[in-house]
Amino acid sequence: MKPSDKIVDVESLLPHLEKTRESGGRIAFTNGCFDLLHVGHVHYLEAARQEGDVLVVGLNADRSVRAIKGDKRPLNGQQERARVLAALACVDYVVIFEEPDPLLLIRALRPDVLVKGADWPEEGIVGADDVKSRGGSVVRVPLVPGASTSELIRTIVRRYGAKNDGR
């Protein structure tokens, strides 16, 4: 499958997920902004993929990222972020969502496993109760120390300054 074919809407994804379920496969789901892809993201997504036969990544739309992270984010637009995620072998599908959280998406997709970073307490993970109520599970993946988009941005600003064009 071409990476661009992995970027889908909910309606076109549902039949694929149903086939996975019918064949006894497990669907893992995670979500995030994935603004500047870094080693922490790759570690996290590879771990998420190990939890299912299919990994669906819910990607916050630009408007959603701004609501969560502030007006200076995202640095990369939603289509670019989706394309980068879709290029990863561990990611089977990317769905962009507009809401501030993925609850409606989780309810529509009905994943067997909900994956988030270990920085989230299980009781704070949106959709955890829904997934567990259907017999699914919640997995928290340990973070790679020092690997975060915010830390990467701080490092760039420290090294190059706000006025430097990065050359």
Image (cartoon, grey):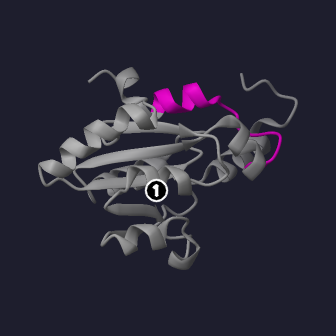
Q: Which residue shows up at 65% across the image and 28% down it? A: 77
**In the image, is residue 3 above or below residue 162?**
above
Residue beneath label 1, please? 107
Q: Is 82 colored magenta in this rendering?
A: yes
Q: Is residue 127 left or right of residue 18?
A: right
Q: Which residue shows up at 46% across the image and 32% down it? A: 9
Highlighted magenta segment, given as a residue range: 69-84
Which residue of the protein is positioned furthest toward the left in this rendering? 23
Q: Is residue 159 visible?
A: yes
Q: Which residue shows up at 69% across the image and 51% down it? A: 150
Occupied quadrant, residue 8: top left
Q: How many other residues sit within 10 Å of disc 1, few (<14), some (14-19) or many (≥20)?
A: few
Q: Is 73 colored magenta in this rendering?
A: yes
Where is the N terminus found, in terms of image quarters? top left
Q: Secondary structure at mark 1?
A: helix
Q: Is residue 138 left or right of residue 146?
A: left
Q: Position of residue 107 (x, y in %)?
A: 46, 56
Q: Position of residue 102 (x, y in %)?
A: 55, 53
Q: Is residue 40 visible?
A: no
Q: Position of residue 133 (x, y in %)?
A: 38, 74
**In the image, is residue 11 above or below residue 2?**
below
- What amino acid is labelled 1 in the image? Arg
Q: Which of the two residues, 36 or 103, is positioned nearer the viewer here?
A: 103
Which residue of the protein is positioned furthest toward the right in this rendering? 163
